[in-house]
Image (spheres, helix red, strand yellow):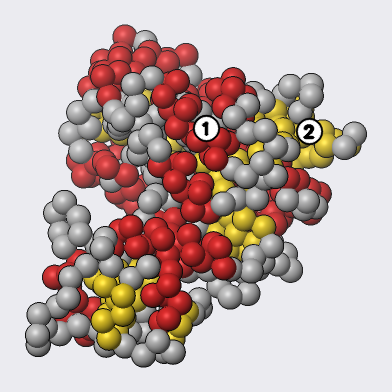
Amino acid sequence: MPELKLAELVEGTGGNLLRGDLESVVSSFVIDTRRLKPGGVFFALKGAHTDGHRYLEEAAESGAAAAVVEREPAVGEPTPPALIQVENTETALGRCGSWVRRTARVGKWIAVTGSNGKTTTKELTAEGLSGDRRIHRTPGNLNNHLGVPLTLLDLPQDAEMAVIELATSGPGEIAELTKMTDPDVGLVTNIRTVHMETFRSIDDVAAAKGEMFAVMREDSVAVVNLDDVNVRVQATRHLGPRVTFGQHASADLRLEGIENRFVPGAVLTFAYHNETLRVQLRMGGAHAARNALAALATVAAVGGDVHRAAQRMERVDAGDGRGKVHRLARGMLLVDDSYNSSPPALASVLETLRLSEPQGRRVLVMGDMLELGPMKAALHREAGRRLGAAGIQMLMAVGQLTHETADAAKRAGVDEVQHYPDSVRCAESIGDLVRDGDLIVVKGSRGLRMGRVVRALLSRFAEGN
């Protein structure tokens, strides 16, 4: 567990101690009292719909050792035993994360961002660097302006390297998070048409992701995807050393081939230091293989052993909602890719489906793709047009926007098309519609809770039922 003296927390937040023993020790740091552990610290954030100061009594009852607040509590108001007052609790959280980065004794700091694949790439990188080293990594997707400082504060005292994931919801955020993490190595996985409700164009997305390259220290190493023109352009904002990957002949890790399949997992072949390496992944799809290549380039950038890293990556399973494959009864296969969706991510899944040869049908369960701004209707229609060429024989579309996809899929020749207003209705129906030997891919965004469909299939068709 990470531990700080209260005096260090005061220094990190830049606040004033209202009460408490400066020599006392605190551990664990949260912004949600439901996650509090005895001895932890509660940051009372003020948001648009809630105010953390209303939960100070709950924090005290949960055993919090200290709270970071903006106002001094009223006389008699129950609070944790130690209180630190700051001007803005959200700003104080970020400052505290930066303080940990400046003071922690960690060998290498790695930052990962990009439009698609950053969480999987982060996990592969951390596993590739592990072995006899303690690697701290972003848990789940705590990758925004709140999650990153919480990840830094959660740094174990014996961590030797840290792999931190950074995400953006608007211009300037990657720059701030990069300054906070001050990476020795920075990777941008790719730049795609995502978050188009926030950004006006792909150029705006590229500029936002490229902020990492712009603010990294000059002696830091940029890991550059040569197959992505937007990444190549943005990488020119960094004047320091780089490690490159991709199909380009000049790439340090040169992609030679991908066996694109869901089962038993994609195969990546690449050249490195005049040697060809083959990596059999447990993760399916060409996108997983490209994520692995990016992770291996990141390992190379920190001076790690690429051969051993490749061996470790072969043992990594896809996470829930991120392409995990389940074998169901009656010869069916289920690919759980329900965590998130975007046009480029869907296109990659469709290509893997096209190349697959299941015993039964190719079945796609597709939820709305979110945050596409004014392009949303056109992009959903385009997705439907692609389904016929991908050999999809059954589409189960979920949400409002997939009306466009369903109509286009019918015109594209998909044999059977169903549309549901929400994932509850789809989960109730899917068990009666799938057949023996079907390959079923559930692709969707968290906002539609497509995991319900996955759980319905697992419950009804668990292997052995």
Q: Which sits in the foreground, 296 or 224?
A: 224
* Residue at 53% in and 54% down: 181
Q: x and y percent of residue 294 in the render? A: 65, 39
Q: Please tell me which of labels 1 and 2 falls first in the chain.
A: 1
Q: Could you tell me which quadrant the C terminus lies in?
A: bottom left
Identify the mark at residue 222; answer none if there is no mark.
none
Left-right relation of 18 to 76: right
Disc 2: which residue: 252
Q: Secondary structure at mark 2?
A: loop
* Residue at 76% in and 28% down: 251
Left-right relation of 387 to 223: left
Disc 1: which residue: 210
Which of the 4 image quarters holds residue 237? top right
C-alpha separation, residue under disc 1 versus residue under disc 2: 21 Å
Q: Amino acid at mark 1?
A: Gly
Q: Which sits in the foreground, 130 or 67?
A: 67
Left-right relation of 449 to 108: left
Q: Is residue 186 above or below residue 344?
A: below
Q: Which sits in the foreground, 21 or 2?
A: 21
Q: Is residue 118 above or below residue 393?
A: below
Crowding near pointer 2: few (<14 within 10 Å), some, many (20+)? many
| Foreground tag (1 vs 2) | 1
Q: Amino acid at mark 2?
A: Asp
Q: Which residue of the protein is positioned furthest toward the top in this rendering?
A: 411
Which of the 4 image quarters holds residue 41? bottom left
Q: x and y percent of residue 83 in the render? A: 27, 80
Q: x and y percent of residue 4 in the render? A: 47, 79
Q: Secondary structure at mark 1?
A: loop
* Residue at 35% in and 39% down: 169
* Residue at 62% in and 45% down: 217
